[in-house]
Image: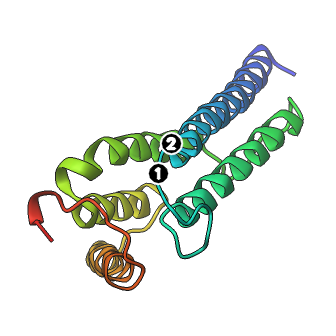
Amino acid sequence: MSDLEAAEVKATDVEVEASRLVRIIAAIVLIVLSATFLVGVFDIRSPKGFDPAGPRFFPLLVTAAWLVLSIAYLIEGLRSPRGQRTQDRSWFEPVTVSALLVLYALLVVPLGYVIATALLMFAAARVLGSRQLVRDAVVAVVLAIVVYVAFTRFLDISLPEGVLGL
C-alpha cells in the first residue's frame, strides 16, 4: 500500500467517524427538542385531559413519537460500527430538518399555522431530496389548509391565525 493510499484510508476513517459523531449529536439535539416540546404539551389547558377529542391529544401523540424516533436514531448512531462507511446517509438532513422545526416553532404564531406549516413542509421536502418544485408547493399548501380546517372546524382546536387572519 502506497503512502497516498494509506492517507486516503485514514481520511476515509476520519470522515466516517465524523459522520457518526454528527449523527449522534443530531440525535441528541432531536431528543432535547422533542422533550422540550413534550413538556410544552402539558401547558395546553384542557378540561378534557388527555381525551382524544381534546386539544392535548394530537400534540402529545406527535411529540411522543418524535421523542421515541429520536432515541431510536441515537441508538442507531451509537451502535453503528466505527469503521463502517454509511451509504446514502448524511448528517445534513437531520440537522437541517431539526433547524427547520426550530424555525417553525418561532414562526408559527407570527405567520400563522397555514403559512408556517406550508413553508415547513415545502422546505422539508426539498431538504429530503424532492425536486418536484410545483408538486411540493401544491401539496404543502393544500395539506396545511386541510389540516387547519380539520382542526379548527371539526375538532374545535384553535391554531395560530397569523397574518392571514383565518
Task: Describe residue 109's horizontal placement relative to residue 123 as left or right.
Answer: left
Residue at x-position 26% and y-position 46%: 107
The residue lying at 60 percent from left, 44 percent from top is 90
Counting from the top left corner in percent of width and height, residue 15 is at 68, 27
Whether tag 2 and tag 1 are in contact, CB under 8 A, the answer is: yes
Q: Quadrant of the C terminus?
A: bottom left
Foreground residue, 108 or 84?
Answer: 108
Instruction: Describe residue 87's horizontal placement relative to residue 118 as left or right.
Output: right
| Relative vertical location of residue 161 with respect to residue 139 in this rendering, above or below | above
Measured in 3D between alpha carbons, the distance from the residue under mark 2 to the one under mark 1, in whole angstroms, is: 7 Å
Report the mark closest to the observer, 2 or 1. Answer: 1
Residue type at tag 2: Gly
Q: Quadrant of the N terminus?
A: top right
Residue type at numbered disc 1:
Ile
Q: Residues within 10 Å of mark 1 (few under 14, many from 20)?
A: few
* Farthest residue, direction top: 3
Q: Considering depth in this image, is 48 or 117 the residue closer to the camera?
A: 48
Q: Which residue is mark 1?
A: 44
SS for dot 2? helix
Write the residue at 28% across / 62% down. Answer: 113
24 or 8: nearer the eye? 24
Residue 35, percent across and down?
Answer: 62, 38
Q: Which mark is residue 40?
A: 2
Bin the neighbour count of mark 2 within 10 Å (Cα to Cα): few under 14, some 14-19, many 20 and up. Answer: few
